[in-house]
Image (cartoon, rainbow, N blue to C red):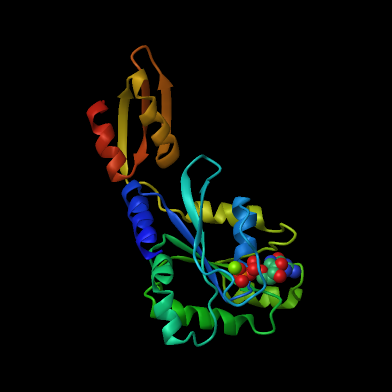
Amino acid sequence: MKGTRDTKRQERKRHSIPSVSIAGYTNAGKSSLLNRLTDAGVLVEDSLFATLDPTTRRTTTADGRVYTMSDTVGFVRHLPHQLVEAFRSTLEEVADSDLILHVVDGSHPDPEGQLAAVREVFAEIGASQVPELVVINKADAADPMVLARLRQQEPHSVVVSAKTGEGIAEALALVEGELPRPGVEFKVLLPYERGDLVNRIHQQGEIASMEHTGEGTLVSGRAHEDLAGELAAYAVT
Ligand SMILES: Nc1nc2c(ncn2[C@@H]2O[C@H](COP(=O)(O)OP(=O)(O)O)[C@@H](O)[C@H]2O)c(=O)[nH]1
Ligand SMILES: [Mg+2]
């Protein structure tokens, strides 16, 4: 599995597709949330290591940018060192991602303890520097006082219920806002036979303006380095 994952990771890096990891204490609702956020049919199970391998879904923002969202193995308190080793490549994916959705069960008796335990694992796998959005799940079953307390302690958070769908639209909007933006500005005149490049700009870039002219499509915006390199041949001033 590691080989496949490494290849996938390289592919993603090469195409500069932003990646989001869903991490959190076991049973927090990570798989349920991935389903809600991507409408994917991932197996949901109420057991310790139901999610052995990361399940990655390709998804798009409201404005058409492609990114991936991965389910991960559930973290537990004092994750034994052998387990960290066994799941190292899975955990490395978390450290490699552009954004971590840290899911916590708001209806659990000690959500703060779970948040802290998972952050210990983040530190151990070198994921502490990855931007983190706390997703307080199971709002339907949680005590509103506890939700309010968590919101106060974790200002960068959103309250959701994977079960009822409450807060899911807000969570998606926050995720989209946190995805890395492509860094290179371009302005190109693409001949009509380069519809492939127009498609890639739609999927991977950010369009500031687009106009269909007699000679082709005049597009300006931002792209990641690889795409900008391919567009350079069609640059206009
Ligand atoms: N009440 C309630 N239960 C939920 C919610 N999200 C997940 N669950 C339940 O919590 C359990 C664990 O969910 P799962 O997605 O497998 O958690 P994971 O271990 O973090 O992947 C399942 O029984 C889910 O049905 C929610 O928003 N509200
Ligand atoms: Mg799961």
Left or right relative to 168: residue 182: left
Q: Quadrant of residue 7?
A: bottom left
Left or right relative to 150: residue 197: left
Look at 51% across and 67% down and name the residue there: 72
Q: Quadrant of residue 33?
A: bottom right
On-image quarter of the N terminus:
bottom left
Marker count (numbered): 0
Q: 181 and 65: which one is in front?
A: 65
Can residue 113 be seen by looking at this rendering? yes
Q: Relative to 126, is 14 above or below?
A: above
Look at 34% across and 24% down and name the residue there: 194
On-image quarter of the C terminus:
top left
Residue most toward the top?
214
Q: Relative to 20, is 219 above or below?
A: above
Look at 52% across and 83% down and name the residue there: 117
Q: 96 and 145: which one is in front?
A: 96
User: What percent of the width, then of the height, locates residue 103?
Assistant: 58, 69
Q: Quadrant of ligand 2?
A: bottom right
Q: Relative to 128, is 221 above or below?
A: above
Left or right relative to 50: residue 202: left
Can residue 123 be seen by looking at this rendering? no
